[in-house]
Amino acid sequence: MNRNTQAATPYGSGFPPRPPPPSPWWCNSCRRSNPGRRYQCQVCRRGNTYDLCDRCINKAPTLHPGHPFRLV
């Protein structure tokens, strides 16, 4: 065994673990799954959230009137 080789760790390769993948989500307007940037309604964010994608956020005043959105 080469002494310059890094010893294996209990986690495998010696590299830090990868972060978990982003949570799956879909746009409540166009229904695409994980369509990119997610804008979430700040009023409806508990329980069932209301999310819009980049393509649909400009329609928020018509689709979901009176509720502010935030990029998450």
Image: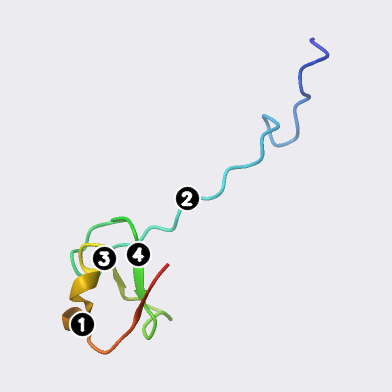
Which amino acid type is shown beneath numbered disc 4?
A: Arg
Crowd around label 1: few <14 · some 14–19 · many ≥20 (10 Å): few
Of callouts 4 and 3, which one flags the residue occurring earlier in the amino acid sequence? Answer: 3
Crowd around label 3: few <14 · some 14–19 · many ≥20 (10 Å): many
Q: Nearer the viewer, residue 49 or 39?
A: 39
Mark 1 → mark 3, Cα distance in angstroms = 15 Å
Image height of 36 relative to 1, above or below: below
Q: Horizontal placement of 19 versus 22: left or right?
A: right
Determine the residue positioned at 75% across, 27% down. Answer: 8
Which amino acid type is shown beneath numbered disc 2?
A: Pro
Q: Which of the labelled discs sits on residue 33, or is there none?
A: none
In the rendered image, residue 36, in percent from the top left (x then y), is placed at 32, 55
Question: Which quadrant is the C terminus positioned in?
Answer: bottom left
Question: Which quadrant is the N terminus positioned in?
Answer: top right
Can you name the residue that lies furthest to the right here? 3
Mark 1 → mark 2, Cα distance in angstroms = 31 Å
Of callouts 2 and 4, which one flags the residue occurring earlier in the amino acid sequence? Answer: 2
Mark 3 → mark 2, Cα distance in angstroms = 18 Å
The mark closer to the camera, 4 or 3, is 4
Residue highlighted by disc 4:
38
In the rendered image, residue 31, in percent from the top left (x then y), is placed at 21, 63
Q: Nearer the viewer, residue 2 or 59?
A: 59
Q: Nearer the viewer, residue 5 or 54?
A: 54
Determine the residue positioned at 24% across, 70% down. Answer: 57
Q: Are marks 3 and 2 in contact (CB under 8 Å)?
A: no
Q: Horizontal placement of 14 versus 28: left or right?
A: right
Of callouts 1 and 2, which one flags the residue occurring earlier in the amino acid sequence? Answer: 2
Crowd around label 4: few <14 · some 14–19 · many ≥20 (10 Å): some
Residue highlighted by disc 3:
27
Of callouts 1 and 3, which one flags the residue occurring earlier in the amino acid sequence? Answer: 3
Q: Quadrant of residue 50?
A: bottom left
Of callouts 4 and 1, which one flags the residue occurring earlier in the amino acid sequence? Answer: 4
